Image (cartoon, grey):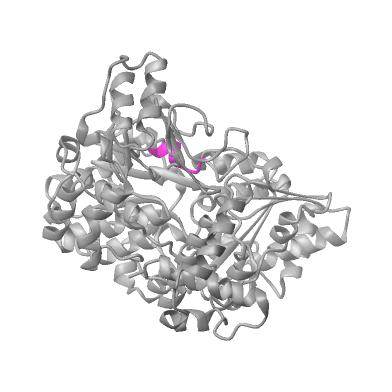
Amino acid sequence: MPAPPSNTHRAKSADACVDFAIERVGKTIVLGLPLALGKANHIANAFYARAKADPEIDLTIFTALTLEVPGAPNALAARLLGPIAERLYDGYPELDYASDRRKNALPSNVRVKEFFLPPGGLLNNASAQRDYVSANYTHAARTILNSGLNVAAQMIAPGTDGQVSLACNTDLSRDMIPALKAKAAAGEKAVVLGEFNAALPFLGGDAAVPEDWFDAIFDAGEYTLFPIPAEQVSLPAWAIGLHASALVKDGGTLQTGIGALSDAVAGALRLRHEKNDAWRGLIKAIGANTPLHVASGGDEPFEHGLYGCSEMLTLGLLDLYEAGIIKRRVVMDPERQQALLENPASLNEDEGIALHGGFFAGPVALYERLRAMSDEARAGIDMTGVSFVNDLFGYEEIARLQRRDARFINTAMLVNGRGAAMSDTLLDGRVVSGVGGQYNFAAMGHELEGGRSVILLRATRATKGKTASNIVWQGGAEVTVPRHLRDIVITEYGAADLRGRTDREVAIALAAITDSRFQEAFLDQAKAAGKLEADYQLPAEARQNTPERLRERLAEAKEAGLLPDYPLGSELTPEEQHLKAALEWLGAETATRKGRAATIFAAFTSGAKPARFAAELERMKLTRPSGWREHLAKRLVTYALDRTPKPR
């Protein structure tokens, strides 16, 4: 049955949307833009341009995770990144306010507030640091509404029969847009604007809303969705993912984040399901068959499957869904959900949701696979409000039934000696990213029967040529998840069960998964604080946490192709993958003056043969160098390629 005629205004341009909004709310504008992908970029740019031209306009943009086309840190990196950026971001309308903010050049009548920043991208940007708003993701809608929000602008997918789709950003919009509409109905000044992008996959369920949710819509045609390329998954990341995969119960619930560690978790879960014997061998090799793994996880393929409930729908989660691993369906009726728990076979073919998400963003493949998915498969995914996904309030009865044996798997920068996670802010107050939903997931891990909160982190990091431990006794960053919510912490060297443990037991468990180069210093600090007796020694088997030993344990599986560098695929060509790894290695080696001198000397004396890397050098336009700078660049790139294994 056709939908009734819509009263939504059809704007002929983004500028017309600005005129429409100013006519209704005036020149004091608090513009809400969705997190990450779903921003109405053309409309946002039109508002910003109008404010720059008219100082009488007072414009506040309130958003999160502003996506920017990556820039190269140096001329050598630009040779690699330039063509990649042209290929991936051609047709993407960049956000003008982001460009000016990066230069600290926002006009005085414009402020940009964000509750989540691009990880590490704005550490030294004064404007972004001053106007960061710390808020749990579940509270962000309330925070933005209370800031005086009077205009919302979102990218949406066109549909039929009077329906459009919020698609990539139901997260806050499911709460904020109805609230704005209610304000307008009560006589307050408020406007909701939509921007059609035909490239955006149409998702139904809670994402599908009537067109008249929007007061005006501008049809921007079809333009590039911002891609977030997959990161290379190193052997330490694979080890972390393998440990995590052994903690997941068949028939349970899964939440993960984005990045190489989360890709490793998805890859390891698929390995467990599809190549179980090989996976078991790897689990034994890295010692991921401890009593913790046995009690909290499993080692069989996923017969009953998992239910995915994650604020972010990632390519990893979508891959698990399409592979039949995320397949346990849930319904919103408590009685029916209880019946399904007692008899899963009673599920009707067209009933239930296997994967709930709040927003999506990721590599090009994520968007392509969502667009190509059948209607039947897409019906098993429901993009909904983050207030449902990230918390229990208002949904506790049904959430407890749905989220059995939940594993909330997130990442941190550092973990201190009491088990507190530091994930978003440095000790001096500079914000790396934001809290997001991490605190809520940690809390739910404790609240739900059978639930566990799992924090992943690499054992070490390298900064300016120096290696440091990511498990520290104190300092380093502000706490994101407090110690009273400590649960499971995983590095490449193992999983530490911290729940219900004494401070002594926590210190020992964390020391056992610390890189052995830093164990003694950590233990000395624990002893000085009175948490360990002065003569305590770690068992011998826990004092072998070295990168070399880990490589030995995983070398055979790596050679056999079980642990690929890009388990979910990559937009980069094989040559570009190798060059990326080589330039990252080169950057680390030349981070100090001494390192630069030593690396340049080695590049001219190593004997590395350019002919071995003809395709890579051709890609960098260094086959026939001109001038001393290009000759030096060719030597350095050849040396770095020689020292860096080809991704496989």
Residue 403, how many percent across, how many down?
28, 43
**Compared to 475, does 132 lie above or below?**
below
Residue shown at 36% from the left, 50% from the top: 256
Instruction: Give the percent coordinates (x, y) of residue 274.
Output: 17, 63
Above or below 461: residue 567: below
- Residue closest to the eye, 375 or 518: 518
Which quarter of the rendered picture does the N terminus lie within? bottom left
| Most foreground residue, 316 or 263 | 263
* Vertical position of residue 614 compared to residue 206: above or below: below
At 19% from the left and 55% from the top, the residue drawn is 305
Q: Is residue 437 magenta?
A: yes
User: Residue at the front extreme?
Assistant: 605
Q: Is residue 508 above or below residue 207?
A: above
Which residue is depicted at the point 58% across and 55% down? 34
Q: Which residues are magenta?
A: 435-441
In the picture, measured across the screen, residue 365 lies left or right of residue 279, that is right
Q: Judge whether residue 173 is colored magenta.
A: no
**Toward which corner of the image does residue 393 lie, by quadrant?**
top left
Can residue 364 be seen here? The reply is no
Can residue 90 be seen in the rendering of this structure? yes
Q: Position of residue 528 (x, y in %)?
A: 41, 16
Along the viewing direction, whichever of 625 and 514 lies nearer the viewer: 625
Task: Give x and y (percent) for residue 486.
Answer: 36, 29
